[in-house]
Amino acid sequence: MARIKYAPGVDPIFGQIEGFVFQSNSYGQTMKSKPKMRTWKSTVQKLRNAYFTTANNNWKNMTIGSRTAWNNFANVYPQPTHHDATKFLNGYNLFVQRNYYKFLAEYQNFTFMDVPVFTSPLNDTFTAVAKLNAGVLTLEFTFTRGDSTLQCLMNVSKTNYPSLHYIGSGTRYVGSILNTNQSVDITDQYLSFYGQLPAVGDFIYVGITQNSLVGGQTYFSAPVLTEVTAGVVPVKYGYLYSGNAILNPLNMAAAAWRIPLWADYEKLRLLFASFRWNFNGSTTPGTSAANFQGQCFAKANSFNYYASIGTVGCTLLPNQINTSGLSMPAGGYMNLGGVSFSMHIYSYIATGDPIIGISSTICRLQRIDRGVTKYLANKGQGFSTRICRDVPGVPDFTIGTYTGNDGRSYPTIVYAEIEIITCNLAETKYRDGSEITLATKSAEWTAPPNTVRAPYAYDFNNI
């Protein structure tokens, strides 16, 4: 804000004229630009401002005993500030900070924690790998100990250099995941914050705040400076395969792998319910016709948005979205005439169950209450699919890699002793190396013997 002092010979002017303020003060007769009120540019900024106002009022209205408990907590269990490990938070700081992370994790279900709760510090570290390929920026996290009771709040910075201190890096919150090994697409969030993606070879800071969903404690992991590397070209929706191609004896799965059965998805569904990943937070498994696990399977931003809590396209409770890391997108399907339907509405994942008559079994993600359900479809239609294998004794949350028959690599994760790829299949060959017939128009899709694959809407940008 500029201030100009004008000479004594000029007649004094007072008041506001064309955005300037004329006044008499200790400098003499001065003119300065009128200050502008701050405007909040986004919903996130407005929510954050509203939270801090509410938190401050809540602190003022708490009992003396509750405020004393937070101050004692700060003295007994000192927690360093986010930017300086030599300085520590006081009771008020801890109250505001702890509840802010609770607010990010719970959003609409948020209630203030008036009394602090301490759980044992974690002997836990993480590594983060940043990969950029085909305009998609992903973070791949590996934790020394998986713990599904911890919500991890992710922060990333703009492009930095190894010589730049973390304090000047400008990190921003980009979402939350559980304290389990995961690969996370942060492209949209990063672009909204910084306007452009980093280039391969650039450095960004990646930070994790571990927020206990049970004990009420927050832990900071030291941020790591990560070089952005070139990753494998990511799969968007994969190919749609006809039932005849999926169950072809030549086999689309590499040796020792297979196409999942409905029973495999049922095991995953029941396990995720036991983890309280139901959209309503319960452990009720439901039935194969109606349950609450759809959102924890789904990559929500690929579905149409629905305002009802629990729908696979709903983003109002971010900690419930894709908690499994299976990232099932709304991939649509191909009808008997070779025409694509239902993109952004359903996720249809074909299973390896034997065809019954004209029907094949599909794992379907759909809207509220229905969740992950068994569905019968005509074997001449086209659906996405996945690949898995049995891994007895391998613990949940273990991540790995599957290499297809055409050499393409896919990320994997283990649940219920089943290792499954975490994106839809984009395989082009059978196990013996022969080509899975590619259809580029509806006439080719419907031609006998209909053992074919095609991208959604025959658009290769959808693979």
Image (cartoon, rainbow, N blue to C red):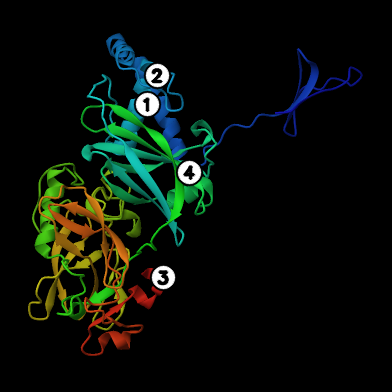
Looking at the picture, how far across and down is residue 288, in whole percent? 9, 59
* Circle nearer the N terminus (4, 1): 1
- Looking at the picture, how far across and down is residue 20, in whole percent? 74, 30
Q: What separation in Å lies between label 1 and label 2 (alpha carbons)?
A: 9 Å
Q: Can residue 356 be seen in the rendering of this structure?
A: yes
Judge the density around disc 4: few (<14), some (14-19), many (≥20) Cα neighbours within 10 Å. Answer: many
Disc 3 vs disc 4: Cβ atoms closer than 8 Å? no
Disc 3 packing (10 Å; few <14; some 14–19; many ≥20): few
Residue 193 lies left or right of residue 174; in this view the side is right
- CA distance separating discs 4 and 1: 24 Å
Q: In what element is the residue under mark 3?
A: helix
Looking at marks 2 and 3 on the same chain, the residue that comes earlier in the sequence is marked by: 2
Q: Is the Cβ of the residue at disc 1 closer than 8 Å to that at disc 2?
A: yes
Secondary structure category for the residue under label 1: helix
Q: Which amino acid type is marked by label 3?
A: Asn
Residue at figure coordinates x 32%, y 59% from the top left: 303
Give the label on residue 89, or none. 2
* 60 over 278 or under it: above or below: above
Q: CA distance from mark 1 to mark 3?
A: 43 Å
Amino acid tagged 2: Leu
* Quarter location, residue 115: top left
The quarter of the rendered structure image containing the C terminus is bottom left
Task: Decide: is 85 above or below 337.
Answer: above
Residue receiving disc 4 = 204
Return the residue at label 1.
97
Pick the residue in front: 162 or 442: 162
What label does residue 461 carry, if any?
A: 3
**At label 4, which amino acid type do we have?**
Ile
Q: Depth-wise, is mark 4 or mark 2 nearer the camera?
A: 4
Report how far apart the C-alphas of labels 3 and 4 lie in the structure. Answer: 28 Å
Contact, CB < 8 Å: mark 4 with mark 1? no
Q: Give the alpha-carbon distance from disc 4 to disc 2, as whole Å.
A: 26 Å
